[in-house]
Amino acid sequence: MAEGCVCYAPGVVSCFPKKTHIDPNNLVHLSHIKIFQDGAKGTFKIVTTLPEEFVNQLEVAVRANIRMTPREQAKLIGGIRKIQAAGKSKKTVAAYMSHIWRLWDSQ
């Protein structure tokens, strides 16, 4: 794993045909309202699920990400732990990103 990122080789996840780095410090801010509106219009859809180990890999990436402040890391890790506590080990790409965006929207 590249330090501070979750990395996938081409084809490991079907929606990532090229080598993909998910950088928790480079998030797109998108409100839940926008996600729901686009879903209702049919312009947004869930395309795949991430591997079960994504949650743990994301936490490792957040802790290793030197561009994030300790406060940002703690907030994101808190959200990751809520997902784990809820027993939702397999989530969609959209659901993970939606959860992360919600955390950032609340700052």
Image: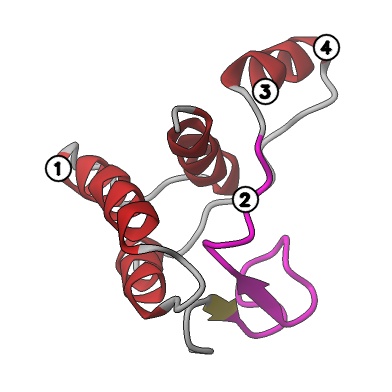
Q: Residue at x 79, y 73 (%)?
A: 17
Between marks 1 and 2 in the image, the one whose residue lies nearer the viewer? 1
Q: Give the residue number, with chain letter if any, for mark 3.
A: 35
Does label 1 or label 3 sit earlier along the sequence? 3
Q: Give the residue number, with chain letter if any, for mark 2.
A: 48
x and y, in percent, of residue 44 in the image: 77, 29
Q: Amino acid at mark 1?
A: Ala
Name the foreground residue: 72 vs 42. Answer: 72
x and y, in percent, of residue 61 in the image: 41, 74
x and y, in percent, of residue 103 in the image: 43, 36
User: What colouring style does the render use?
Assistant: secondary structure
Magenta region, main secondary structure: loop
Structural distance between the alpha carbons of marks 2 and 4: 19 Å
Structural distance between the alpha carbons of marks 1 and 3: 24 Å
- Helix or strand or loop: what does disc 3 sit on? helix
Does label 2 or label 3 sit earlier along the sequence? 3
Q: Amino acid at mark 3?
A: Ile
- Helix or strand or loop: what does disc 4 sit on? helix
Structural distance between the alpha carbons of marks 3 and 4: 10 Å
Structural distance between the alpha carbons of marks 1 and 4: 32 Å
